[in-house]
Image (tube, rainbow, N blue to C red):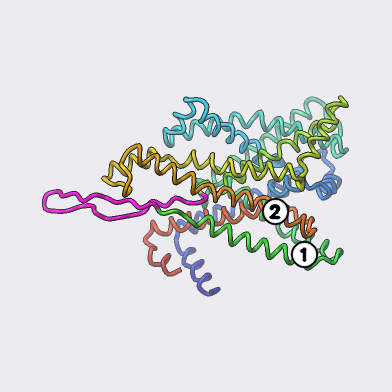
Amino acid sequence: MIQKIWQAVVSLWRVKDVRRRLLFTFGFFTILRFWAHIPLPGVNVDVLRKVFSGNQFLGLLNIFSGGALSNFSITASGLNPYINASIVFQLLAFVFPYFERLSREGETGRQKIEQYTKIATIPLAIFQALGMYALLKGRGIIGDLDFLSLVAFIATMTGGTFLLIWLGGLISEYGLGNGISLLIFAGIVSQIPQELTQTTMIASQGGNFLNLLVFLIVSLGVVVAIVWVNEANRRVPVQYAKRIRGRKMYGGQTTYLPLRLNQAGVIPIIFAVSVVLIPSMLGQFLGNAGNEGIRNAALFLSDLFKQDGVVYNLAYFVLVVVFAFFYTMVVFNPEKIAGEIQKQGGFIPGIRPGKPTADYLNYISLRVTLPGALFLGLVAVLPAITQGVMGVTMMVLGGTSILIIVSVVLETAKSVGAMVQMRGYDKFLEKY
C-alpha cells in the first residue's frame, strides 16, 4: 500500500504543471508562516501567549489564524472580515435583484461581487482591529496609543487581512485548489504539533491516557465518516432520446446526474464558525466599557456563548445546517440544469422536460442535502459532546478543524486528479 502511494506521488511529481503548482503552493505557505511571526510593535508577546493558553475562545481564534494571533503578527486579524463580508453578499443575492443578477452573470458577475466584498471587508477589518486593541489594552498587553499610533495599528491589521486575501488569490490562480480554504487549512495544520504536544503533556500529568485514546479513536472515526459523506451522492438517471441525422443515429444512451450529500463542501463550516464567534468577540470588546450596564451585558454574552456551553454548540449546529442549505441553493441551479438537459435532448424518466424537471431536481436536492447538513452539524459539535462525557477538555482542535482539514484535502485531491486527467493520465488514475 505504501509503495503504491509512493509511486502515485512520484508519478504526480512528473507532471510538469502539477509540480509547478505544488511548488508555488508550498512557497506561498512559507510566506504565510513568515508573516505569522512578524509581531506588531508595542505588544508584550509573552503575556499575550499566557492569556491565549488560558482562554479557549482566543485559542480557537488563534488556531484559525495559524498562530498569528498569539504572536500578534501583521496577519493577526486573519480572514474573518473577508469571510463575513462574503456571507453578507451571498445573503444580499437573495434579497436584492441587482446582486441576484450579478450572481447569474458568470465570471463577470463573480468578479464584480468579489470587488464589492473586498470593499466591505475594510470596515469589518477596522472594527475587528478596534476590538482587538480594546481587548489587549484591558488585559495590560498593550499600552495606551496616541491617535497616530492607533491609526497605524488599525492600518497594519487591516493591511494584514488584505495580504492574506491577495495571497489566497495567488494560490487559486497559480497553486492547487481554492486559495482561501488552503490558507485556513495551512493555519490549522501548523498548530496541530503544538496542540498534540500540549495535550499529551496534560494527559500524562492527569493520568487520563485512556480517555485521550478513546477521543483519538472517535476522531479517526469522524474522519472516515466525513470522507464517506463527502463522496456519497444520489445518482439521478438521465435518458437521451435517439436522433437520426442522415444515415447515422445519435443519442439513446443513459447517464446519471450525481447530486452530492455535501454539495457545499467546507464553506458551511467556515461561514458558521465566523458567525458563531461574533457574540464572544462582542463580549470581549465591550467587557472593558465604562458603562456598568454594558459591561454586565458583555459578561452575560461571553458566558452565554462559551465554547463548551450548550447555547454556543446549539447555535453552531443550527448555523452549519442553515449554511449548508443556503450554499447548496447558491451553487446548485435546477432551472439551469433542467434547461441544459432539455437542450441536449435528454429527460429524466417519468418526468416531463422543463419546469417539472427543475422542480424534481430541487425536490431531490433538498432531501439529499438534509442528511448531509445534519451530519455536518453533528460532527461540528461531536468533539464538544465527547469532551464533556470523557473529560478530555485540553484539545482546542475540534470538529471544525477536522472538517476543514478533511474537506480541503479531498477538494485539493480532486483538483489534482482533474489536472492529471486533462493531461491524458486516465489509466494512471484508474490504477491508483
- Determine whether label 1 and label 2 are within 8 Å by CB: no
| Magenta stretch secondary structure, dominant | strand
Location of mark 1 (residue): 211
The answer to which quarter of the image holds residue 164 is: top right
Q: Is residue 253 magenta?
A: yes
The single residue placed furthest to the front in the displayed view is 350
Measure how far apart labels 1 and 2 are at the Cα level.
16 Å
- Residue extending furthest left? 247
Of tags 1 and 2, which is closer to the observer?
1
At label 1, counting other C-alpha atoms closer than 10 Å, the crowd grade (few under 14, some 14-19, many 20 or more) is some
Q: Which of 26 and 379 is in front in this view?
A: 379
Circle 2 sits on which residue?
Answer: 398
The residue at the point 62 percent across, 36 percent down is 82
Q: In this picture, is 154 found above or below 337?
A: above
Query: Residues in magenta?
Result: 236-262
Pick whichever, 340 or 149, lies toward us: 340
